[in-house]
Every structure is written in structure tokens, then in C-alpha cells.
Amino acid sequence: MKKKREALLQQIVKNRRESIVLFATEYTNEEPIELLEEYDVPSTYIDTGTGFFVEPDKVVTTIEVLAGANTVSAIPANRLKKVVNDRNIRSFNEDNQYQIIKEAKVDIEGVTAFDPRNNLVILKIAETGTALPLEDSDTAQIDETVYTLGYQEEMKYMGTAGTLQNRYKDNKWLQIKTQFYSGNGGGPVLNGSGEVIGVVAYGIGSVTGDNSSATVATAISSNVLKELFANSGEIIPLEQLQKYSRIRAYFLEAQANAMAELYDDREAIKYFNTAIKLNPDLVEIYARRGVIKARLDNFEGAFRDFDKMIQINPGHIFAYNNRATSKVNLGDEQEALNDLNKAIELAPNYVMAYTNLGGTNLYMVDKKMDEGDIVEARRYCQAAIDAYNKALALNPKNRVVRSHLKDAKRMLKSSSLRME
């Protein structure tokens, strides 16, 4: 089954390549110069995203790919491939990226439609390509294998296979288990027939514990795209699109994420707050802002954000995991265990949830010992051992979990937990 899926993926990657468009965007970093210098962050930088043809001269991508960019370059896959082959380029670096973009890009004539509520924009470009067929996204089944196409940051074209996990926001948004890289944003989500059932928006975290890329992605359904495409109208300049407050909110969200990575937490929250006010549909902010609030020990505020995220998307496994941490710090350990078990129910290979499940059970050991309930303390200690064993089965190289497992085993054998 795995070989068959991989063979179909490679076929789709090859057959749909001429429909894919690389977007290269140049930004000016708005963070303070002293902060940029301290962390060796460039004041200007190039980012990448993906799009695809929905008509011979029209390309769809996400607003997030374009928002706030000083310049936007659209590069159809065939043109990119030709330039790379003509120049015999084997690897990408900062110097040849600029040259490739300059030679391969095509003019963007303007915006024919955009949907700031659902992170979609359609552009008219001065080039033709093969439009991908749009399927009814409601025909896709939960647990069905789906395929995503796009570019990594190194401008490398690739595809990944994944699974449709969940629908939310009245079936307009899809949650997909797949390997997501930042350059995949704006790329198509395809069914086994190579038809579009969604547009990749962004990654929302790692299940495996490897934070180099996300293992869950959010996508906008093809039915939303169909409706937007049907209402395409007068062309407006891309520069005009960038001026709308709801569009700028996407860039503010990205700036907040960048500040959070630098642990400039209070500024990150300010940017998140402004972004959500400008565009209340940027709902993933609740999960991200909750993490920052927890880092600032504002566990009540963090709980409210994670709770809001779960109300919007009951399948948001990362919100369950993080809400559990807030609950522990607020003294509600049993409800924290319920949240962690729910996250594991939704994602049985979620390493961090098992790790936190072990830690929360160990916390309960101390609590029950203080109450003099040795039987319950032993039960929670064994539950912690079981959780750590499951985490290690999924990620045997996790030294932190291995250390916690040893501690739990020693605790269970200790005189304080010995039954008379």
C-alpha cells in the first residue's frame, strides 16, 4: 500500500508540474535594528510560496504568501526549470536565487479576486499554463490519502502524501496530516485523480517532535476557491491589495510569529492582537498567542486562547495539548489528563502529548502521596511509565523522555510508594 501511494505521488508530481507556480517575495523586516543585529537577522530577505493555474492566465495562491511584500515575483515551473537547466544550476544560494528570479519571473498584471476571510487570492499573470481541475471538496473522505505540491525554501519542487484528518469552519477549512514546509503555502491539495480539493494555507505544528517542519497543515477547501473564482471581476493592482487592513493583518501575524521565534513575547502579543482586530478570521492566532501567554505565565489568558481555538476547530490536537499545560498550572490536573488523552485519540503518534501525559501523571503521584493515597499514587506512576514508553516507541532517540522514564521507574520502586 505504501509503495502504491508513493508511486502515485511521483506520478502526480510529474504530471502536474507545469501547472505549479513559484512565488518569490522580498520583505523589509520591521523589527528594531538592534534586535535584528543581536540575532543576526537580515533587514531584507526573500521568502517563497506556491501557487497554481486555475485558468490559462490566472493563478491562485494564499494571501499569506503575498501580504506585506515589497516585491512579488511569479515564476511558472516550466520557466524556472528552463533557467536552472540552461545555467546548469545544481544547488541554490543567495546569489543565484536573485539571478534565477530575475530571468524566470513573469509580470503580474493584477488581482482578479481575493477572499481575506479564507486566505485566498487570484492573480492574472502574463504567461499561460495548464489549469488544474477543481473537484468538489465535499467528495473527499476523512482518512483519504491526499497529495500536496509546492516549493521548499531552497526553491526545490516536491510533493508529499498525506491524509485528510478533519473539516471545520462549516467545511470551508481542511486539516491534513502531511509534511509541510514553509514554501508549500498556496500549493494545491490533490485527490488520487490529481484534482484539486484544497489550497494549502500553513502548517500548525509537529506531531513527531521534530520541529524542522510541521506535520499537520490547514488548507482552504476547493469549494471556497470555486466560489471565489466564479466571482472574479475587475483587475486591481497588487499594490492596492496590500493596502487593505484585512490583508495587512496577515503580514502582522507573520511579524508576530517572527518575534515569537526570537522570544520577544510581549511585542509578539501586541502584533497578534492588532492582527486579529484587523481580521477576526485569522483564527490560528488564538493557538499561537496562547503559547506566548503561557511563556509569560499568563495561564488564564493562555487557557482562554486554546479553548477558543478548540471551539473553532475541535480537531486541533496542538490546542488540546497546550490547554492541558494551562490546566495543570491552574490546578486542574484531571481535566489536563482528559485533554491529553483527547489529543492522543485524535493523533495516536503525537509524541509530545504522550510526554506531557507522563509528566502530568507524575505530578498526580506527588499530589496523591501528599493526601496519603498510596494506591492512587502507584496507579498514576504506572500510567506515567506507560505514557513515556509509548513516547519512546515513537521516538527512541528522545533523551529527555528516557530520563523521565527512569525517574518514574525509580519512583515506583521507592519505599515511599511501596505497599505494606
Image (cartoon, helix red, strand yellow):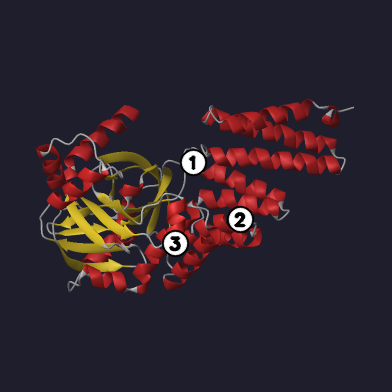
Q: Would residue 281 be found to the left or right of residue 303 on screen?
A: left
Which label's residue is closer to the chain start, 3 or 2?
3
| Circles 1 and 3 in contact, beta carbons < 8 Å | no
Circle 3 residue: 32
Image coordinates for residue 152, horizontal then vertical, percent: 30, 43
Q: Disc 2 marks which residue? A: 294
Q: Is 4 in front, or is 363?
A: 363
Q: Nearer the viewer, mark 1 or mark 3?
A: 3
Residue at the image position 37 percent from the left and 71 percent from the top: 246
Mark 3 falls on what kind of element?
Answer: loop
- Which of the marked residues, 1 or 3, is nearer the chain's N terminus? 3
Any mark on residue 131, and which? none
Name the amino acid type tagged 2: Ala
**Which residue type does callout 1 highlight?**
Val
Return the x and y of residue 407 as percentages of the image width and height.
71, 30
Which residue is disc 1 drawn over?
207
